[in-house]
Amino acid sequence: MIRKEEAIAQPEAIFNAASDYFDAPALSFWNRFGQQTIDRLSLRSGDHVLDVCCGTGASAIPAAVSVGSTGQVLGIDLAESLLELARNKSRQQGLENIEFRYGDFENLGLPNESFDAIVCVFGIFFVPDMLAAVRELWRMVRPGGKLAITSWGEKVFEPANQNFWGAIEAERPDLCRKFTPWERICDPASLQSLLEAGGATHVEIFAEVGTHELVTPEDWWTMVLGGGLRGTIDQLDPAARERVRQANLHFLRTNEVHSLEVNVLYAVAQK
């Protein structure tokens, strides 16, 4: 069994490493899905918002714009490198109603019913005990407030993702994933059940089937380096890493892959 401190350390290390590519143009989907999450909340001027697993602010910054100068947004993440990027971006936009803080959102110690909206975009599945995490987030939602959980659906960056793991298996079978964290909640029924079991009420699930465009095949490799797959790549020796890269690019070029399937689930609950 993975101990809690190990479960925290793994994504923290991976995303600190991935910070060098996290905001590259090839990863524009972070902003796209972050904005769409906020759009579903219909935030009001003056609202107080908590964004956990906030990354570089893809949802926290749009939230800060939505709630205006009388509102307040608190972004929490484990990766300090991503938080520094988020702080720089918010300063560049002149936002004074937003704070980015390092923390484990399972143990924030914030008061009950203290936020009008709480957001977690592509982060809940990193927590071993997702049910406890939902309960903790729901505890901090004010009556009338909303909790938004955004997660991956059944197809994520296909067909490139499947080819990536095939190339990894050829090099290092021990690194080949048999299971991805979001598979626990990759269909609407599972995600809805999780939120309701965690106490959330009036849960609505919105399933989005879309694509992410690749300008060049190299965009996919940039995505690998700027996301969760970075943790696998960094365990390869340089020669194996280059073979995996070449195998990925060859697959995309040969099959003329110019876009990737991306399924996303948006869950919104109201207290």
Image: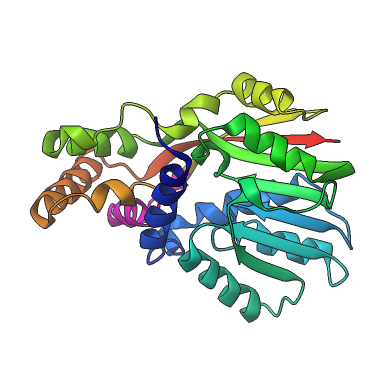
Evaluate whether residue 104 shows in this view.
yes
From this view, report whether residue 23 is shown above or below residue 151: below
Left or right position of 236 against 14? left
Q: Examine the structure image and report whether residue 123 is included in the region drawn in magenta.
A: no
**Magenta segment boundaries in residue numbering:** 212-227
Instruction: From the top left corner, tell me how far across and down residue 177 is, in percent.
Output: 30, 32
Residue 214 shown in magenta: yes
Q: Is residue 39 above or below residue 210?
A: below
Q: Is residue 259 toward the left or the right of residue 114 in the image?
A: left
- For the point 43% across and 61% down, the residue is 22
Quarter of the picture containing the C terminus is top right
Which residue is at a point 63% across and 38% down the rendered structure image?
A: 133
**Percent of width and height locating residue 159:** 33, 34
Q: In the displayed structure, would residue 21 be above or below residue 36?
A: below
The N terminus - image quarter: top left
| Number of numbered tags placed on the structure image | 0
Residue found at x 37% / y 53%: 223
Residue 25 in the image: state x and y as whole percent.
Answer: 44, 63
The percent position of residue 56, horizontal first and vertical second, equals 55, 63
| x 40%, y 43%: residue | 259
Q: Quadrant of residue 16?
A: bottom left
